[in-house]
Structure formats: structure tokens, C-alpha cells
Image: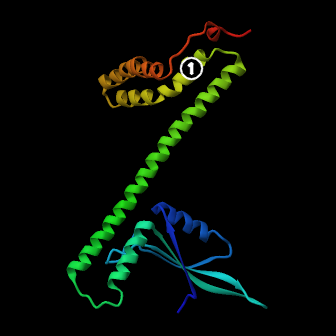
Amino acid sequence: LTDIAGIRIICSFREDIYFLADCLLEQDDITLIQRKDYIENPKENGYRSLHLIVEVPIFLEHKKKMMKVEVQLRTIAMDFWASLEHKLKYKKDIASDQLTADLKKCADESAALDLKMDAIRKEIEVLILICKGGDWFVDAASKLSEILGIPKYVIGATIVSFATTMPEIIVSVAAALDGHSAMAIGNAVGSVSANTGIILALSLFFLPVAIKREEYLFKN
């Protein structure tokens, strides 16, 4: 017996496991004794989890003593599989290759589900960042227009348009450097057509624009 306590931490996503483990080990009063990564290197039966044996201080009446604690970190899917596998096989003398293979297949499917959910989370985070970044950019451009006394359409036609055109510039330059001149020209023409025919049309469809003459005049 090397540890007197055990802690199991259940995480929503696989990446959270390593993040929390790093946060734990960064504490100056915790010392890592042993690390077993059964996520990157699963057991033969499919078991996955991150195990840490750490030393933590406990404070007695007259002294401080370092004690060993085991910390297990798993995702919800990993814990679901491990709990059911334990209930199905604990203290049961069952020797079945088919059962072992079925449990291993379930473990692999759970691991694939973890990876898929991680990918979905990242896609959502990227979409949120794009939308929020667009809001910040528009707000900043509007504020710049007010500070400089320049009509907003001028800011939109220069700073904003250049920023939003950067992807097309990169694609066209890359295509030209690779010798695909037709692709570079097509991308330039297509982006202009899309901006004029689709983006402007959709913007006007969802939010009709009233053109005010004073908005297009420079302020004195």
C-alpha cells in the first residue's frame, strides 16, 4: 500500500483531463511520484484513464507529513465504460474471448466518441470566436470613424474591406506562386462577384439600409 487516499475526477472533454492534471502539478505543495497515461496507452481490455500518484502535505498536531494520494482523471465516457465493465466482471470467473472483444470494442467506440465531441467543441468555439471577432471589428471600425470624423463607408471601403479581403489575397498569391494563374484570377473575380451579389444582397435582405446623405460627408 503506497497511497492512503484516492480521488477520481470526471471531465467533460479529453483535453480537460490534461489541463487539470497540469494545473494540479503546478502547485508548489504537490510532488508527482508516478504518472500512468492509459489514455494515450490504453490497457489491453480498453481501459482508459490518467493516473497520478502524488505526494501532498498533511498537517498533524506537531508536524507536517507527506502522504501519497492517487488521482484518476477520466472523461464521462471513460468512467461510464469503466464502471459498467467493473460491475459486469468484478468477482465473476468469466473467461470469454467474445465478451472481452465486445468490451474492448465498446471502449474503442467510447474513445472515438470523446474525440468526436472534442472536435465538435472546437468547431463551436471557432464559430463563436468568428462571430464575436466580427462584432469587435465592426465596433472598433465604427469608433475609429467617429474619432477621425471620417464617414463610415470610407472606413468600410478601406480598412474593413482590406481586412476581409486578406483570405482572398493569400489564396490568389499562393495560387500564382504555384503556377495556377487561372485559379488566382478566378478567385479574384469570384470574390468580387460574391461580395457584390451575395454578401451585399443578404445584408440588405435581413436589414434594409436607409442611405442618409450626411453619413457620406466628411465632418469639419
SS category of the residue bearing label 1: helix
Who's the residue at 60% across and 9% down the image? 212
Residue 43 vs 63, above or below: the answer is above
Please say whether residue 152 is visible from this viewpoint.
Answer: yes
How crowded pointer 1 is (Cα within 10 Å; few <14, some 14-19, many 20+) is rated as some
Who's the residue at 40% across and 67% down the image? 77
Toward the viewer: 31 or 76? 76
Task: Report whether 109 appears left or right of 217.
Answer: left
Toward the viewer: 70 or 184? 70
Residue 97 vs 167, above or below: the answer is below
Who's the residue at 42% across and 27% down the image? 168
| Place of residue 175 in the rendered image (x, y in percent of width and height, measured from the top left) | 35, 29
| Place of residue 57 in the rendered image (x, y in percent of width and height, measured from the top left) | 68, 82
Task: Report whether 2 appears left or right of 121.
Answer: right
Task: Report whether 34 appears left or right of 182.
Answer: right
Total labels: the figure holds 1
Res 78 quadrant in image: bottom left
Question: In the picture, which quadrant includes the C terminus?
Answer: top right
Res 28 quadrant in image: bottom right
| Place of residue 88 in the rendered image (x, y in percent of width and height, measured from the top left) | 33, 82
Q: Which colour scheme appears in the figure? A: rainbow
Who's the residue at 43% across and 18% down the image? 201
Q: Disc 1 marks which amino acid?
A: Gly
Please say whether residue 39 is visible from this viewpoint.
Answer: no
The residue that label 1 is drawn on is 156
| Place of residue 185 in the rendered image (x, y in percent of width and height, measured from the top left) | 34, 20
Pick out the residue farthest to the right.
62
